């Protein structure tokens, strides 16, 4: 299964971040080929993750404030903007490390996103997911391994 995930990630080299969003402290990246109207693949990173530029931490999943009402939204949006320079960045490489199944995504401009296990308490909750929309599958990656499910659009 790891081979399939690595092949899917390898095929993403040269694709650009077409959009990104943050939900709570989870990061969703849409990666697609230039000129395509639909993203080919998405990567969903649950906490913990960290965005680095030139080897320095810019923002991580622990930096997002909890939004309980509208008054909290400006602070949340301010932290989200720290990810804005990812838009349009080309993915250069993606690595999965063992035994933890941590993810490293390297982008042009010396940018990198690291997805890592925040806890091993909830072993069934994915640390990250890879949604291969073209292939119609979703890979759920935990510290225990990889499961695959049909992708439902």
Image (cartoon, helix red, strand yellow):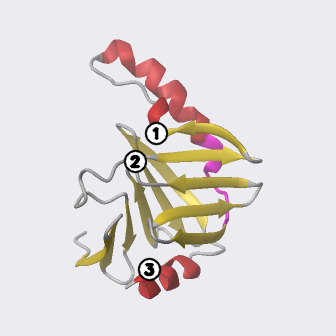
> SS for tag 1?
helix
14 displayed left or right of 71: right
Q: Earlier in the sequence, mark 1 or mark 2?
A: 1
Quarter location, residue 144 = bottom left
Can residue 34 be seen here? The reply is no
Residue drawn at point x = 47 percent, y = 54 percent: 116
Q: Earlier in the sequence, mark 1 or mark 3?
A: 3
Across and down, in percent, residue 91 comes to: 64, 66
Residue drawn at point x = 23 percent, y = 79 percent: 150
Which residue matches tag 2? 118
- Specify start and end residues of the magenta stretch as a single range: 84-91
Which residue matches tag 1? 61
Q: Which mark is residue 22?
A: none
On-image quarter of the N terminus: bottom left
Residue drawn at point x = 45 percent, y = 19 percent: 74
Q: Earlier in the sequence, mark 2 or mark 3?
A: 3
Residue drawn at point x = 59 percent, y = 62 percent: 105
Q: Nearer the viewer, residue 84 or 38?
A: 84
Which residue matches tag 3? 5
42 displayed left or right of 145: right
In three-dimensional space, the C-alpha distance between marks 1 and 3, rounded to whole angstroms, equals 23 Å
The answer to whether mark 2 and mark 3 are in CB contact below 8 A is: no
Across and down, in percent, residue 112 comes to: 65, 54
The answer to whether mark 1 and mark 3 are in CB contact below 8 A is: no
Q: Nearer the viewer, residue 87 or 54?
A: 54
Front disc: 1 or 2: 2
The answer to whether mark 1 and mark 2 are in CB contact below 8 A is: yes
On-image quarter of the C terminus: bottom left
In three-dimensional space, the C-alpha distance between marks 2 and 3, rounded to whole angstroms, equals 21 Å
Label 3 crowding class (10 Å Cα cut-off): few <14, some 14-19, many 20+? many
Across and down, in percent, residue 80 comes to: 51, 34
């Amino acid at each position: 299964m790891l081979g399939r995930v690595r092949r899917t990630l390898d095929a993403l080299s040269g694709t650009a971040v077409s959009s990104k969003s943050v939900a709570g402290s989870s990061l969703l990246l849409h990666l697609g080929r230039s000129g395509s109207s639909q993203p080919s693949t998405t990567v969903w990173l649950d906490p913990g993750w960290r965005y680095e530029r030139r080897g320095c931490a810019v923002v991580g999943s622990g930096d997002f404030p909890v939004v309980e009402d509208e008054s909290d939204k400006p602070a949340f949006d301010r932290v989200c903007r720290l990810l804005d320079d990812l838009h349009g960045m080309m993915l250069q490489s993606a690595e999965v490390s063992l035994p933890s199944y941590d993810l490293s995504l390297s982008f042009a401009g010396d940018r990198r996103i690291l997805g890592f296990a925040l806890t091993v308490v909830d072993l069934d909750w994915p640390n990250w997911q890879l949604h291969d929309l073209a292939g119609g599958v979703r890979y759920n990656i935990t510290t225990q391994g990889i499961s695959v499910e049909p992708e439902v659009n």
